[in-house]
Amino acid sequence: ENQCPEGFTKPPVLLFSLDGFRAEYLQTWGKLLPVISKLRKCGTYTRSLRPVYPSKTFPNHYSIATGLYPESHGLVDNKMYDPKRNATFTLKNAEKSNPQWYQGQPVSTNFEYNLLLIIKRYLMHLTSYYTVPL
């Protein structure tokens, strides 16, 4: 019962992010959410998550996908205006499909690149506290 259906050589990766869904809801309301409860039982999950700043839907979802902070992947809000292109990004208009708003690559497509970028930023942060004489 806890296995993938026939035909899968590897278990598929499905990422569900439920906006506004508190971690405690599965404990409190799990019996009313049988599909989500089964996905949790048969897969993996996290008990909680620390949002990036700003704590908005699209910046957080894209941070999960890329492993980058909003200032690095470009989505800093659910609604943004770019004066150079005279364009507004919102989840309600076609501009959301314009790739110019999205920087960074999804972790799944370029894991090594993103990992090195994260390590580099972390090391730069650590070494910023040191003064090295030249």
Image: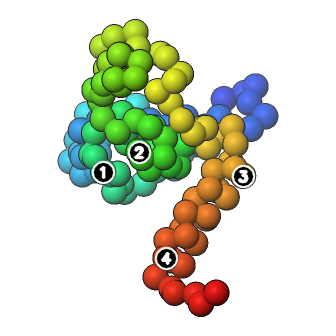
Q: Name the N-terminal-most of marks 2 and 1.
A: 1
Q: Mark 1 points at which residue?
A: 53
Sequence order check, earlier mark of 1 and 4? 1
- Residue most extreme to the left: 28
Q: Is residue 18 visible?
A: no
Where 130 falls versus 61 (above or below)? below
Secondary structure state at the residue bearing disc 4: loop
Secondary structure under the numbered disc 2 in the rendered image: helix
Q: How crowded is mark 3: few (under 14 residues within 10 Å), some or many (20 or more)?
A: few
Pick whichever, 100 or 8, lies toward us. 100
Mark 1 neighbour class, 10 Å CA radius: few under 14, some 14 to 19, many 20 or more: few
Q: Which quadrant would the N terminus be assigned to in this image? A: top right
Q: Which residue is drawn at 49% across and 17% down?
A: 98
Q: Earlier in the sequence, mark 2 or mark 4?
A: 2
Q: Mark 3 points at which residue?
A: 112
The amino acid type, in three-letter code, at marker 2 is Pro
Residue of label 4: 128
Separation of marks 3 and 2 at Cα, in angstroms: 19 Å
User: Could you give the CA–CA distance between mark 1 and mark 3, rounded to whole angstroms?
Assistant: 24 Å
Q: Nearer the viewer, mark 1 or mark 4?
A: 4
Q: What element carries label 1?
A: loop
Whether the residues at callouts 2 and 1 have beta carbons within 8 Å, the answer is yes
- Measuring from the top left, give residue 22's x and y in whole percent: 24, 46
Tag 2 residue:
70
- Percent from the top left, x then y, of residue 101? 46, 27
Answer whether residue 73 is visible to the viewer in this image.
yes
Residue at the limit of the structure toward the right, as seen here: 9
Asked if the residues shown at circle 1 and circle 3 are in contact, with their CB atoms under 8 angstroms apart, the answer is no
Circles 3 and 2 in contact, beta carbons < 8 Å: no
N-term-proximal mark, 3 vs 4:
3
Give the CA separation, mark 2 to mark 1.
8 Å
Category of crowding for the residue at label 2, using alpha-carbon neighbours closer than 10 angstroms: few (below 14), some (14–19), many (at least 20): many
